[in-house]
Amino acid sequence: MAPLTPKLVVPVDLKSKPWQQKVPLHNRWHPQIPAVAEAKTGEVFRVEMVDWTGGAIKEDNSALDVKSIDLSTVHYLSGPIRIVDKDGIPAKPGDLLAVEICNLGPLPGDEWGFTATFDRENGGGFLTDHFPAATKAIWYFEGIYAYSPQIPGVRFPGLTHPGIIGTAPSQELLNIWNERERQLVENGVESFKLCEVLHQRPLASLPTTKGCVLGKIQEGTPEWEKIAREAARTIPGRENGGNCDIKNLSRGSKIYLPVFVEGANLSTGDMHFSQGDGEVSFCGAIEMSGFLDLKCEIIRGGMKEYLTPMGPTPLHVNPIFEIGPVEPRFSEWLVFEGISVDESGRQHYLDATVAYKRAVLNAIDYISKFGYSKEQVYLLLSCCPCEGRISGIVDSPNAVATLAIPTAIFDQDIRPKASKVPVGPRVVRKPDVLKCSYDGNLPTTKNPCSSSNS
């Protein structure tokens, strides 16, 4: 018999605010956030999601919504979903939850997305010291392809995926998160060794009651107040999976998530139509609403069997990901290299983050020669299907990182030639990203050898 249509377990209404949904959403990790739905192993079920901002970013011609966004509210997640086996026995702490992505896509009638950079004093991004202003580009979907009026001459297929998928932490694990991230905030500036050049953004986002949404738990109650004060933000990926932003987790992928609470309490959100490795602009994928069709399996005792703790407790583990067989095919790439020497010429020791920053800056400077603003290229490299690699991590003192860009996404040949960069109306890109002014006082990094300083 043919399989049944996936059962919709978490619907969303895009005309309603995230906190007004019939099936409540949440934007924190905590073991006491109650499940809003249940799914059995072996059955295919559907989860719908709002975009990660819950509709705060609009399909309009202004970046003011990006500049003023309240980042205490994100990410809005669908779930938690309690997972039980065919006999009704829930997943148990110590199990592995195998989650297969059977299908996914934008919600019908909402086939558009956005890419943005936050204002430097409200979140910033990977290159916020170079690009401090809030910017935005709108993307429209034509089947598997995306195009943007703000970045003309570019069209590419999306590798659609959820940015966030994870299980609920136990109270013990939550306490570990909060303590180590608190120590980083309190002591991090003094203890930095390798990445001082990248200390342009908050070191961590600690628990806050501001903007907190806890699903079925009513705001203003003593229970809500207690949980909101200790619930973890969803911004970083952690032992439970969470915000890993792995662009290859598309159709046919499997995620093997550790289970820390009874029922696993699976949550997901932050849907991306497409993303480049690193999601460098922070709001950097093509962010959208969407749906996932999922199927789960419980591997009893799988944490101990398959995961090795990288820390002092059995909870210090990380998920395993199995990439699916569906992805865009490109045969020609232009690859940009970076080494761990920063813009001031300072040597860093085997610092892959500094090296990747240099690779991205080199790519931005190069592609801007072909009629694009640097802001256009920055957003493009955050959301197009580019490939980032740590190419060398042993040859002291320089780490080497590379960024490979598929040349087929452009409507012109961007490879170096003896005839030099072409000139003329074909490559004059008059549209630009939507942009706000930067009113802050933080200094902006300049690259003295750049073809033009942003």
Image: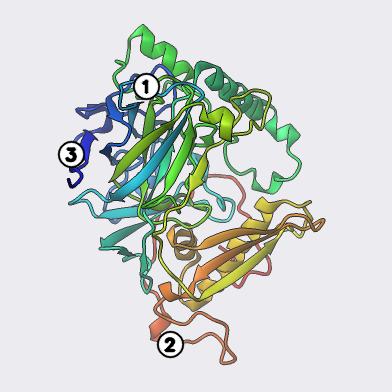
Q: Nearer the viewer, mark 1 or mark 3?
A: 1
Q: Nearer the viewer, residue 41 or 432?
A: 41
Q: Residue furthest bottom?
A: 419
Q: Quick one: SS at disc 3?
A: loop
Give the Cα distance between marks 1 and 3: 34 Å
Foreground: disc 2 or disc 1:
1
* Residue in view at x 69 percent, y 48 percent: 197
Q: Which residue is mark 1?
A: 90
Mark 1 residue type: Pro
Dot label at residue 424? 2
Residue 55 spot, x, y in % from top left: 28, 41
Residues under labels 2 and 1: Cα distance? 65 Å
Question: Residue 89 vs residue 367: left or right?
Answer: left
Give the mark nearer the N terminus: 1 vs 3. Answer: 3
Q: Can see residue 452?
A: no
Other residues around mark 2 within 10 Å, as few (<14) / some (14–19) / many (≥20): few
**Label 1: few (<14), some (14–19) or many (≥20) C-alpha neighbours in 10 Å:** many
- Horizontal placement of 117 versus 142: left or right? right
Disc 2 to disc 3, C-alpha distance: 45 Å
Amino acid found under the numbered disc labelled 2:
Gly
Viewer can see residue 54: yes
Secondary structure type for disc 2: loop
* Mark 3 lies on residue: 15
Q: How is the image coloured?
A: rainbow
Q: Residue flagged by tag 3: what amino acid is it?
A: Lys
